[in-house]
């Protein structure tokens, strides 16, 4: 049987990557090596970064490295319109789904990613795009079997962050003239509102985290929900737990 594709979603700084790494059994590189050796006995939960470059296709890996440079290693500037970034993101997630995720899922491994298209969607909706347009552009991108939305106090997320947030995370593309804590809180809170509207879908669950809690405490809270998501389809629209 194919594996289950599960995504963590939430605002910038909520801890998606840290928690996904903590909650999974093996890395993507280990899973690819198991595929190469033909080891498919166990069904571990595999951590796959949303920025992972393909380990199963050299051609795709070369293309994805160039897309990654454009998306994450070219700095932040408002010079290019949103329509440009929508196209590049759609290309990235198409390549990721088909050459990073699909081989691992087809082998029967469950996968946990530290974010998918939804946070990007939530911000584009703030910037005037329609969900209908996004559904068309991303219509052929594989979507998760289940999504766990991580919610938290936005101001507390900003205050606990040691490294500075990127201008794009502070609201640069939303047209704020001065970027800082206030714009981060407003921008991320509005985006979280859109994520909560996505979470009414039966494949979504919501959990509220306390930014003052440790990674271990948050992981302990999330782990039972992941067990459920790996083995059962949700029966309610959104079940919110708190820490």
Image (tube, helix red, strand yellow):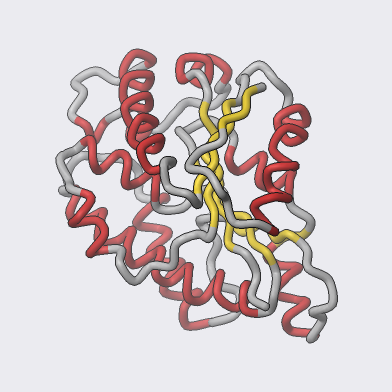
Image spot of residue 30 (x, y percent) = 76, 68
Q: Residue at x 18, y 48 (%)?
A: 130
Q: Residue at x 54, y 54 (%)?
A: 146
Please indicate whether residue 114 sits to the left or right of residue 138 in the image: right
Q: Is residue 227 above or below residue 223?
A: below
Please indicate whether residue 165 sits to the left or right of residue 49 in the image: left
Check the picture and name the quadrant holding the N terminus: bottom right
Q: Where on the picture, by quarter, is residue 195?
A: top left
Q: Is residue 6 above or below residue 119?
A: below
Please indicate whether residue 165 sits to the left or right of residue 87 in the image: right
Nearer the observer, 50 or 194: 194
Q: Where on the picture, by quarter, is residue 222?
A: top right
Q: Is residue 45 above or below residue 162?
A: below
Please indicate whether residue 173 sits to the left or right of residue 94 in the image: left
Image spot of residue 173 (x, y percent) = 23, 36
Q: Is residue 63 above or below residue 157?
A: below
Image spot of residue 15 (x, y percent) = 59, 34
Check the picture and name the quadrant holding the C terminus: top right
Residue extending furthest front? 235
Give the total number of marks visible in the rendering. 0
Image spot of residue 11 (x, y percent) = 45, 33
Q: Residue at x 40, y 35 (%)?
A: 196
């Amino acid at each position: 049987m194919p594996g289950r594709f599960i995504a963590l979603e939430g605002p910038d700084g909520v801890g998606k990557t840290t928690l996904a790494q903590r909650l999974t059994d093996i890395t993507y590189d280990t899973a690819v090596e198991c595929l190469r050796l033909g080891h498919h006995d166990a069904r571990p939960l595999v951590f796959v970064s949303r920025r992972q470059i393909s380990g199963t296709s050299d051609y795709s890996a070369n293309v994805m490295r160039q897309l990654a440079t454009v998306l994450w290693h070219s700095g932040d500037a408002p010079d290019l319109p949103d329509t440009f970034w929508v196209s590049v993101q759609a290309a990235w997630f198409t390549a990721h789904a088909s050459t990073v995720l699909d081989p691992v899922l087809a082998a029967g491994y469950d996968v946990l990613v530290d974010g998918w298209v939804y946070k990007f969607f939530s911000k584009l909706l703030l910037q005037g795009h329609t969900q209908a347009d996004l559904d068309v552009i991303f219509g052929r991108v594989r979507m998760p079997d289940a999504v766990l939305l991580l919610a938290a106090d936005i101001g507390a997320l900003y205050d606990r962050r040691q490294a500075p947030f990127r201008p794009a995370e502070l609201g640069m593309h939303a047209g704020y003239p001065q970027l800082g804590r206030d714009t981060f809180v407003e921008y991320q809170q509005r985006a979280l509102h859109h994520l909560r509207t996505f979470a009414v879908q039966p494949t979504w669950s919501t959990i509220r985290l306390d930014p003052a809690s440790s990674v271990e405490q948050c992981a302990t809270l999330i782990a039972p929900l992941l067990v459920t998501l790996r083995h059962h389809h949700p029966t309610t629209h959104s079940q919110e737990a708190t820490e």
